[in-house]
Image: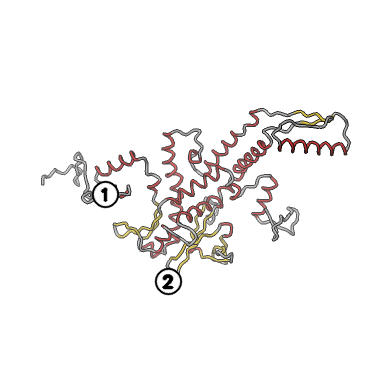
Amino acid sequence: MIFDVLGARESRSMENPSRPLSGEELSEWMGERQGVLVNPETALKLAAVYSCVYVLSSSLAQLPLVVMRKVGDRIEAGSDHAAYYLLHDEPNRWQTSYKWRETKQHHVLGFGNGYSRMVRSKRGELVSIETHLPQRTSLVQNGNRWLYATQDDDGYPLAVAIEDMAHVRALGSNGKTGVSIIRQHADTIGLGLAAVNYGREFFEGGGRPTGLVTAKGVLNDNSWARLKSAWATAVSRLRQSENKTLLLPADLDYKALTIAPEDAQFLDTRKMTRSEIAGLFNVPAHMINDLEKATFSNISEQSIQFVVHTMMPWVQNWEQELNRRVFTRAERKAGYYIKFNLAGLLRGTPKERAEFYRIAIQDGWMHRNEVRVFEDLNPIPGLDTMLINVNSRLLGPDGNPLPVTKE
């Protein structure tokens, strides 16, 4: 909606070239003319869209995010790097790590782009990671140089170099910016919003049209005005009273118009829209509370598919973008990198974890104290020894079992 400086709505005509419309204003104008306005804000009013955005944003935000460092053949926590605390705990003074990632993923899903500015000290050390709104940030070309035009916290214009802006983007066509899922599929989401609006208006009207009022005689202009006034008065009294009897003047007849129950069932349309929206965001239907075709067996499989086919692409997207913006080239050569831990989403049931640990211990590639660490238990002396199944035999270079030696 377009407003003037006083807050009143400003009327702009498509035929008036002296008052041009921007692209965003044009989309809003067309949405209002069609009766359903679809943008990142209004789309969240549709339950299926909100659920999908929440599931993806919260799932990515809850994953442990740490800085790691590879030194030779060993991998250790990069807690000596300034980015470790920023990414793991508090990227800026306004947000925790969880809220920063949740907000950025929401921006990517809703607007197609998520912007985070790397603020460095004069020595080049990373001191904070600041959030920038996608509505106020754009990629612009200044001669042969590309910059991000945005605003600071006080609303002042700010130019940010490409290497200082972590730009996580959705699927796009120009290679530089992403396109919002909501904008790409505005028709599908608009259908869902229209169904919600129809349902509200339908049930506010009692689930049926009011009826047909006929006059016994001929009406002139004055009579027609009195008729409308009498009808409005009768209906308003009906809504305010528990008495559901409609009282009309003697020269009027009222015939109620009923509607077939099947015509009032628009739930199928809403179910179809909910399923389509879940598919657009690549979220399993059961995760947005659509359990119509879900069973306990396939929910387990769908949860694994959610991690592998839905979350893994987003995790890769985030990791690669943060790695090239958080660290300098020298730091990357020194072995620093960022890692999301997906183990939390693949944790499984206690029975499944016990079976996994048993196999790992018996096959000799985990010891028991490592298992205790995964289960948030303190290590116990004597459990660092590797075990191996007595039925397993080590193979020599020729592929034959080595002889068993007695100590």
Who's the residue at 69% across and 32% down the image? 208
Query: Where does residue 383 sit, x and y in percent of width and height?
Result: 23, 49
Residue lying furthest bottom: 122
Residue 406 screen position, x and y as percent? 11, 45
- Indicate whether 5 appears above or below 340: below
Give me the disc on residue 123: 2
Residue type beneath disc 2: Arg
Q: In the shown orientation, is residue 365 left or right of residue 62?
A: left
Please identify the quarter of the rendering in which residue 121 is found: bottom left
Mark 1 residue element: helix
Q: Is mark 2 on a helix, strand or loop?
A: loop
The picture quadrant where one finds residue 301 is top left
**Residue where numbered disc 1 is placed:** 369
* Horizontal and vertical percent position of residue 244: 71, 31
- In screen coordinates, is 267 left or right of 326? right
Mark pair 1, 2: CA separation? 42 Å
Task: State which tag comes first along the sequence, 1 or 2.
Answer: 2
From the viewer's perspective, tell me whether residue 122 is left or right of residue 214.
left
